[in-house]
Amino acid sequence: MNRLLAPTPLLLAACALVGRADPSAKTPVAVRSHNANDVDVYLLCGDTHPQWLGTVPKQGVAEYAISRERRICAPGLNFFLVVRTQEKGYWVGPLRGVQPSSYVELVIEKYAGLSTADMQDVSR
């Protein structure tokens, strides 16, 4: 039994050194729009506390970041998209478990109601 426990401290030390993300790091958000209009992008915790991230130009791209404070959201993070010429809004989400090592890709479709947000863990 002691032979099984002997390598445990070494294994724990090795795990501690392997790819730990800085918990204060911002989580990147890449946005790609296929929409024929400019789209305002908001980030919300659940359905409260909207934060304007920026405007994505028609059929353009943008990059934003989610701060540590915004990542901590029990109901999950939602994006709210407002198509400027239509003055209509569309929900995308929720995303749960966003980490410093996460990468979020938001794709705004021609019909903004079909837009998607996908989260990947880049530490793996």
Image (tube, grey):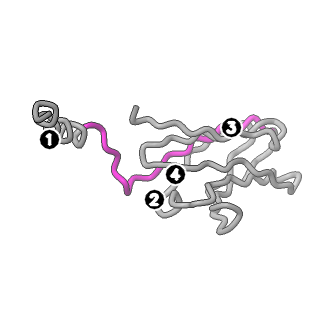
Q: Amino acid at mark 4?
A: Ala
Q: Which residue is mark 1?
A: 9
Instruction: Indicate which disc residue 65 carries.
Output: 4
Instruction: Indicate which disc residue 68 carries.
Output: 2
> Can you give x and y, in whole percent of width and height, for residue 69 in the image?
48, 64
Residue 20, magenta (yes or no): yes
Residue 3, magenta (yes or no): no
**Which is closer to the viewer, label 4 or label 2?**
2
Mark 2 or mark 1: whose residue is earlier in sequence: 1
Instruction: Indicate which disc residue 119 carries.
Output: none
What residue is drawn where x is 58% and y is 60%? 74
What residue is drawn where x is 82% and y is 43%? 113
Q: CA distance from mark 4 to mark 2?
A: 10 Å
10 Å crowding of disc 3: few (<14), some (14-19), many (20+): many
10 Å crowding of disc 2: few (<14), some (14-19), many (20+): some
Q: CA distance from mark 4 to mark 1?
A: 37 Å
**Which is closer to the viewer, label 4 or label 1?**
1
Residue bounds of the magenta highlight: 18-35
- Mark 4: secondary structure: strand
User: Quadrant of the image for the C terminus?
Assistant: top left
What residue is drawn where x is 44% and y is 52%? 26
Q: Amino acid at mark 2?
A: Arg
Which of the pair 121/84 is nearer the observer?
121
Q: Amino acid at mark 1?
A: Pro
Main SS, magenta region, reads: loop
